[in-house]
Image: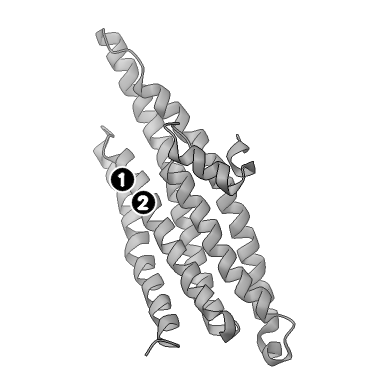
């Protein structure tokens, strides 16, 4: 897996993202945003542990932080994985289709690449769903002085979830196997239905603590 994109500075990543290069794109950006969201929840945990006031939940918060650590690394690996999965699809679009044989070959390659290209954004959506659930716990057990960061973090995870879904849907829309496409779309829609609302609830709860 090419990890070059994850080694760039923030400025360099944004510059490449803004260029006409095929990768990184929306999927990699969504994964990076998910990592930022998970890290914000993790930060709230870091500000909570070690404080006598929160001794009763310290073990729980350490466990949440461990999960957030793992999610952050998972998101970062998905930035690179998204680029790696899109490159074969990008090449497939350029295959010749002058003869019937070439058209058949291109269709087969395209279908395979479209399936592969759906796997990473679905994985990003799964990671976002887990991160949103973590934010619910950070909101409940984290220090109130950083509760706004839970709100920001969960919103980033929601944006990453919805953004990654578009990468799923643009690929399924081009599939010829509509039964398989419908199965993938159902998985993505189920995650959206459950976790967009979950993120909204967490955000509203956080906002209500200091906005009257």
Note whether residue 42 is visible. yes
> Local crowd at mark 1 within 10 Å, few (<14), some, or many (≥20)?
some
User: What residue lies at 58% left-to-right and 40% top-to-bottom?
Assistant: 5
Give left or right: position of 137 versus 98: right
The reply to whether residue 82 is in sight is no
In the depicted structure, whether residue 165 falls above or below residue 113: below
The image position of residue 144, as x and y in percent, is 56, 86
Instruction: Please say if 28 is above or below 209.
Output: above
For mark 2, does the 10 Å Cα neighbourhood hold few (<14), some (14 to 19), or many (20 or more) residues?
many
Which residue is tagged 2?
165
Q: Report, in whole angstroms, how far the alpha carbon at label 2 lies from the one at label 1.
A: 6 Å
Query: Which is more toward the observer, 16 or 118?
Result: 16
Q: Quick check: 84 left or right of 199?
A: right
Q: The N terminus appears in which quarter of the rendering?
A: top right
184 left or right, relative to 42:
left
**Residue at (55%, 64%) from the top-left corner?**
38
Q: Which of 116/166 is in front?
A: 166
Q: Are marks 2 and 1 in contact (CB under 8 Å)?
A: yes
Q: Is residue 160 above or below residue 15?
A: below
For image coordinates 55% across by 57% down, the residue present is 35
Residue 169: which disc?
A: 1
User: Is 173 situated above or below 122?
Assistant: above
Q: Secondary structure at mark 1?
A: helix
Question: Secondary structure beneath disc 2?
Answer: helix
User: x, y (%) of residue 172?
Assistant: 30, 40
* Quadrant of the image occupied by residue 141: bottom right
């Amino acid at each position: 897996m090419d990890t070059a994109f994850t080694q760039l500075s923030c400025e360099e990543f944004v510059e490449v993202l803004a260029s006409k290069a095929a990768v990184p794109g929306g999927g990699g950006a969504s994964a990076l945003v998910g990592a930022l969201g998970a890290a914000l929840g993790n930060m709230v945990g870091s500000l909570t542990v070690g404080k006598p006031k929160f001794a009763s939940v310290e073990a729980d918060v350490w466990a949440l932080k461990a999960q957030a650590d793992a999610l952050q690394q998972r998101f970062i690996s998905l930035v690179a994985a998204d680029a790696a999965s899109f490159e074969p699809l990008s090449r497939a679009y350029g295959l010749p289709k002058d003869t019937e044989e070439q058209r058949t070959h291109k269709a087969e390659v395209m279908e395979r690449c479209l399936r592969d290209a759906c796997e990473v954004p679905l994985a990003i959506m799964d990671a976002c769903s887990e991160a949103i659930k973590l934010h619910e716990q950070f909101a409940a057990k984290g220090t109130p002085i950083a509760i706004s960061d839970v709100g920001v973090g969960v919103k980033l995870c929601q944006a990453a979830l919805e953004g990654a879904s578009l990468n799923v849907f643009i690929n399924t829309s081009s599939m010829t196997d509509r039964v398989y496409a419908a199965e993938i779309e159902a998985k993505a829609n189920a995650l959206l239905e459950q976790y967009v609302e979950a993120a909204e609830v967490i955000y509203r709860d956080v906002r209500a603590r200091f906005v009257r």
